Image (spheres, rainbow, N blue to C red):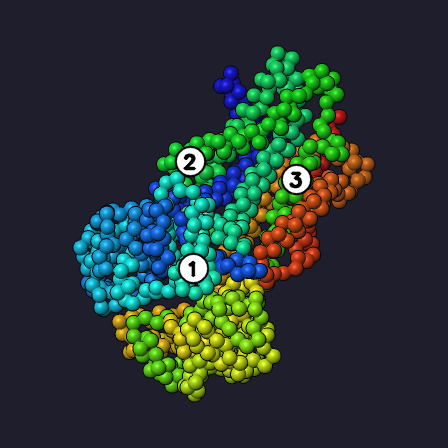
Amino acid sequence: MLSNYFKTAWRSLTRGGSFSVINVSGLIVGMAGAALILLWLFHEISYDRFHANKDRIYQVYAKTDIPGEKHASIGVVSQPLGPAMKQRFPEVESVARLADVDHFLFTAGEKSFTRLSGEFVDPDFLRIFSFPLIAGEKAEPLRSANSIVLTEKLARKLFGSTDVIGKTIRLDSADQFKVTGVLRDLPANTEFNFEYLLPWSYLKKLGWNNDDWVSNNCYTFLLLRPQTDLTAFNAKIAGFTRANAGRNDLWLHFLYPLNKWHLWSTFDNGVPVGGLIDTVKVFALIAAFILLIACINFMNLSTARSEKRAKEVGIRKVAGAGRGLLIGQFMAESLLTVVISGVLAMALVQLSLPAFSRLVGSSLSIPYDSPGFWLSTVAFLLFTSLLAGSYPAFYLSAFSPVGIFRKEFRGNRATLSPRKVLVVLQFTFAIVLIISTLIVREQLQFAQDRDTGYSRNNLLYVDFEGEIEKNYRLIRQELLQSGVAVAVSKNWGNMSSGGSTTWGYRWPGEPPHDTTTGIGIFSSDADLVRTARMHLVTGRDIDIYRYPTDSFAVLLNETAVKWMGFRDPIGQIIYNPYENKRWHVVGVVKDYVSGTPYGAVPPAMILGPGSAVFTTMHIRFNPAQSTAACLENSAAIFKRYNPAYPFDFHFVDQEYARKFEDAQRTRTMAGLFAALAIFISCLGLFGLSAFVAESRIKEIGVRKVLGASVSGIARLLSVDFIRLVLIAFAIAAPVAWYAMDRWLADYTYRITIGWTAFALSGALAVAIAVLTVSFQAVKAAVANPVRNLRSE
């Protein structure tokens, strides 16, 4: 029985000609597009799920506790918190702190490298997380202050092999480290990104530890004991730091589970409300839409050929075939078509996977060695077969043999036929994707064109490493005197990412409810306004070289002036009660964007060097010289004063552009799959228009004999399809507006949705439909009517 089903199915498929090609092509493209999205979705959902203790691993988060204001949530906490929690709470099995480091100079033999990504961690880090050691002391590889753990990739980079246990590495020409472990290279689906691990005890040895309970500067991870009640434990730790801080602490603490780190990174009032999960949901819908559009093509083209299959159904029923057998026959045809399409789609996925991986910024692969993959593939094919084949099977098997042989059967030409509904549905999906893509593009361009409040061109920064900070004044002087730079400034942080956020500053006349509002902190020794080409609204720049009292000078941005309520800000005193320091306002600068380009500019202060820890220097290249010449001369100057390190620089405009990479990736992906949706929809439209032209070929011949023009006949065959596309646009426009309005609600700095994207999408959809249908319509209209009417 089954063998006969598939033999008949194969014959029907091969006899289908162009209709079979269109069916298979649509399914191939639709299944390949959906499969690519699903591979990416599974990759994103699988982040850090490989850890053996994944259900018991948590990160300690902090949220502000300010009456009458929303909670701000951050993933960094104070350094003493983690060890104190392990000592105080029996529910905590292990604790590991983590602090980023990337500026050491690594020397192994004759090889030297800088800018390697690493972490300071507590010894229990490798006990909590399942990053497997392939060599070394599996129990306690980071107990010694001068031990180091490398990844396979870094071990090969430094020594040429992974057999490196016991070998020595020198850091910054100062300390010797013994390799005590080699980790397997980190998988692509992890939030962590490091090439080496250093013990936390070495951070203390360098004097970089900070035991202040209210200074949030490190990541802290806990492994809770089995059966721990998370809600009850969060209630225990919420105000734990208050007893240790020695003063009113603004932070409450809670644990955030590992399975939410990657996808749920956006908080509202201390509660996770979104993040990458929103993009995942959107593209899961897009995958479903693309597959559904391909299946709609199959349904439409299968039912469109119903008149040709009607006699076959009648003969089978007269010969004794029941409706169940006929449904089985048509479902077998569907399954065969889907399986053939699936095999070809898999080949297409494999060919396009490298380019798609570059697009999404992840290393994707097809897990051929996974039984789960094959089970999922079979389930995917069966689901697609049922989705595509069920309606045609029930539709075709319902024909009455009596009506067929009396020639009472006619294809469904009702005003509201299921076939027309399906065409409207698939074009609705496609138009929604087009409108959404255009609005995402418009929002991205709007943010990219935003006035940042400073000039990014010819501006670069160099992080302090080696002897740069020690020789800063000499480097600055030579850069200016040589004509390489027109301005130089020493700072904490960089213009693209800013400094940090702090609380608790006081000033005369402060509103009581604002005393604990967060304010952005940056720093400068001199000439920041000239170096960054910021806009000075009033007053002057900080300049420690001309004004020695500028050690405690401060610049405010316009938002800070309004927030503090200053009518005349110059000379006002701002007090830091924690450090017992007073800052005098010397100038006001126009608001500048140092954080997200999509958000409102927060209040910000640029402090003089009175309490700053400088990390960076900004350089404004001389526009009279070429960038290449400036870089060459700068490299020579830095080589003289910091010989052990390469000249490592970052252009601010390039760093700023990286803020848009995720949005650009989303836009490109949405555009790509919108194009696929349109392509698949047009394949179906092409097939349907061909069938309509074929089924009305004699009517066309009669009309031509009676004098109808080619344009008139083409318009006759096209108008119904154009009407369906217009109906689809009328449905899609409000749906797309609602979806995009919800998406834009996450952005403070956003566009207002206008009519342009809708008009362009509607015109594009209609134009594509006209071009698709017109080919078949004109082809039928210019055919010789004598040949078409000869049988009459």
Q: Nearer the viewer, residue 697 or 790?
A: 697
Q: How many marks are shown on the rendered structure?
A: 3
Q: Are marks 1 and 3 in contact (CB under 8 Å)?
A: no
Is 340 placed above or below 100 here?
above
Mark in front: 1 vs 3: 1
Element at label 3 = helix
Give the image location of residue 31, x and y in percent.
52, 38
For marks 3 and 2, the one nearer the N-term is 2
For marks 1 and 3, the one nearer the N-term is 1
Q: Looking at numbered disc 1 in the image, what kind of residue is underneath it?
A: Arg
Q: Is residue 2 visible?
A: yes
Residue extending farthest bottom: 546
For marks 2 and 1, the one nearer the N-term is 1
Q: Return the mark for residue 201.
A: none
**How packed is label 1: few (under 14 Cα within 10 Å), some, or many (20 or more)?**
some
Element at label 1 = helix
Q: Quadrant of residue 692?
A: top right
Residue labelled with disc 3: 425
Is 398 placed above or below 631 here?
above
Q: Return the mark for residue 373.
A: 2
Q: Looking at numbered disc 2 in the image, what kind of residue is underneath it?
A: Phe
Residue labelled with disc 1: 242
**How packed is label 2: few (under 14 Cα within 10 Å), some, or many (20 or more)?**
few
Q: Nearer the viewer, residue 486 or 178?
A: 178
